[in-house]
Amino acid sequence: MNPTDLSVMALGGATVLYAIAMVAYAIRLARVADEKVAAKSAAAVPVGAGAPATPASPADEAPAASSPLKRSAKAAGIARSTTLVGALLHGVGLAARGIDAGHVPWSNMYEYTISGSFFAVVAFLILQRRRDVAYLGAGVTGMATIALGLALTVLYKDVDTLPPALQSYWLVIHVSIATIVTGIFAVSFIASALQLMRDSRDRGVRWTGARARFLDAVPAASSLEALSFRLNAVGFVLWTFTVMAGAIWAEHAWGRYWGWDPKEVWSFVIWVLYAAYLHARTTQGWAGRRSAWLAIAGFTALIMNFTVVNLFLQGLHTYAGS
């Protein structure tokens, strides 16, 4: 089997596994929410209320008490295992693409998409080893499923020779950090979105119906905000390095550090938005919904930089859209 076929097959398998993991994580959220609702209902019943009931035997009580927990644990196990195997296949697909191309696999939109989604899943798995963030799983694996699906069906491009401007070691330094930080910002975006949803539910504004019961399995909005802040702080440092490395590479390739190319402008816009988020969050007391919206604005600008700028704006980075 040649590397091209191996890469496509591995990425296709990863897409399927991520889709299965997304469903399993969603089921886990629903089960955990049901368990919490049932626990609250049981705690709300006064002791001794109602007519005395015949004591149930342990055999009668065990299925009712353990069945939801078992279903939740089973869904969590399936979600974790399929995500891990999907990430391994994803990595194989990336490596095979790099071997086939003869260079690191992030020279065009197809390769950047499969790389950025890989790092988002890896960031999630690393977080999962340190703390329980399974509530982010459905969002992360869902985003990875969509990204890989679009990459394989819409953005796919056969291996080609690198343009002269990309034939540099700066491709490894600059773009590798950009793909890693994209994955980190993606996970942070999901946390901020859940923060807004949970906050709206707590205030009784929206997300209050039965379909939004999964939010009962999500941590408090303040905890989600703290997680998003830590991720964005790390991502901002890496994005700062990305912009600086890009300027140095531009001087090597084109003889100037900054030329207000559309890609350069949007990279700066992203930096400003996340800088504003961190500044407002730490010094101006913009905690809560306002900081979450700023974080979401930053990620939206990142996606626009990858899509709109690459596809519709002409500049020295036009090759990135090929």
Image: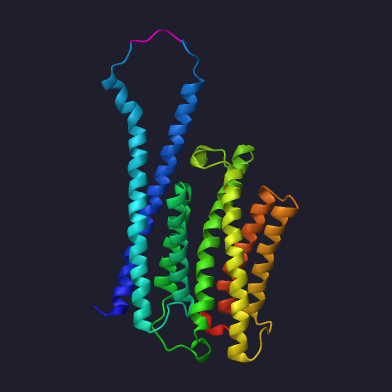
The residue drawn where x is 57% and y is 38% is 208
Q: 133 or 129, which lies in front?
A: 129
Q: Nearer the viewer, residue 266 or 165?
A: 165
Q: Position of residue 4 (x, y in %)?
A: 32, 79
Seen at 56% across and 78% down, the residue is 310
> In percent of the image, x 60 and y 59: which residue is there?
232
Display coloring = rainbow
Residue 33 is situated, as x and y percent measured from the top left of the image, at 46, 37
| Quadrant where the N terminus is found in the figure | bottom left
Is residue 144 visible in the rendered structure shown here?
A: yes
Q: Which residues are magenta?
A: 50-54
Q: In the displayed image of the protein, which residue is found farthest to the left?
A: 1
Which SS type dominates the magenta stretch?
A: loop
Residue 28 lies in quadrant: top left
* Image location (x, y in percent) of residue 66: 33, 30
* Corner quadrant of residue 268: bottom right
Q: Would you say residue 314 is visible in this rendering? A: no
